[in-house]
Amino acid sequence: MKYTPIQPPAAKAPKPLVKATVKPKGTAHLKPPGEIRIIGGQYRRTKLPVPDKPGLRPTPDRVRETLFNWLGQDLTGWRCADVFAGTGVLGFEAASRGAADVLLCEQEPALALALKAVQARLKASAVRVERGDGISALKRLMPGSMQLVFLDPPFDSNFFEPALTAAAQAISPTGLIYLEAPRPWTDEELLPLGLQIHRSGKAGAVHFHLLTRCQTPPESAELPESPAVA
């Protein structure tokens, strides 16, 4: 009998190594999604387009959820302004929860047209879309007329202080300002503007704040007592 040696099984080729990709923490805001949803109210689940434009970073779902929990969800009758509107998601969230008047101001022409298209699609009669400079729009508002102003300027801009100054004049004595920024703001910085922090939080690289007017106007906080008259 002819002897046939048994061949050992061929070794399996090693699987190619796949390099794991880990998204750096806090970079979710760098590339916008293709669309974003309204998360509450009568327009809930409505999709808003998010163009891939430099600096455009819509407020994330979890931040909006926190914000409107702070606000109490029901904004019936409120007058609001979103003056760096972008996708308009903050303003449309307010209108979705019953706000009576919502100004969306956006300087980029294509974004302003997109806002008007969404307003028409939703038949959102409480929403007004204006193309132009957000800070100028705030200055044109009647002083003390707003219950809520949303401020989400481009993170690499110098608009923060002038926008806060204009918003502080626009809100009522019990009004609120929502501020998104790349860093936390402090009461010491806000005091000269007549503002103080009511609530604040952080999500990734986004710091968000809910501001109110100071209880005591800064210019009268340190007034000396009048001398007694003999």
Image (spheres, helix red, strand yellow):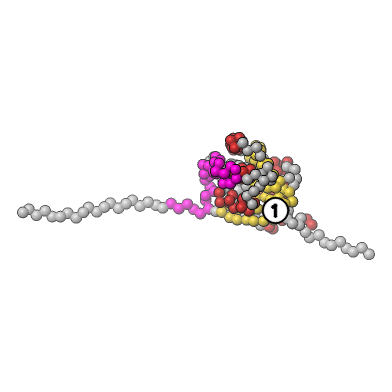
| Residue named by callout 1 | 212
In the rendered image, residue 131, in percent from the top left (x then y), is placed at 65, 37
Q: Is residue 95 left or right of residue 5?
A: right
Residue at the far right: name it: 230
- Identify which residue is drawn at 56% across, 54% down: 203
Q: Nearer the viewer, residue 192 or 117?
A: 117
Amino acid carrying label 1: it is Thr
Residue 117, percent across and down? Answer: 59, 35
From the viewer's perspective, is 8 left or right of 193?
left
The crowd level at tag 1 (other Cα within 10 Å; few <14, some 14-19, many 20+) is: many
* Residue 19, x across and y down, in percent: 39, 52
Q: Secondary structure at mark 1?
A: strand
In this view of the protein, which residue sits in the foreground, 157 or 20? 20
**The residue positioned farthest toward the left in the image shown:** 1
Q: Point out the image quarter for the N terminus.
A: bottom left
Was residue 22 drawn as part of the magenta stretch in this picture?
yes
Which image quarter holds the C terminus? bottom right
Vertical order, 103 against 211 (above or below): above
Per the image, is 114 magenta? no
Residue 134 image position (x, y, % from top left): 67, 42
Q: Is residue 201 in view from this perspective?
A: yes
Q: Main secondary structure of the magenta part?
A: loop
Up the image or down, 43 lies above or below 226; here it is above
Nearer the observer, 60 or 132: 60
Residue range (magenta): 21-49
Q: Is residue 112 visible?
A: no
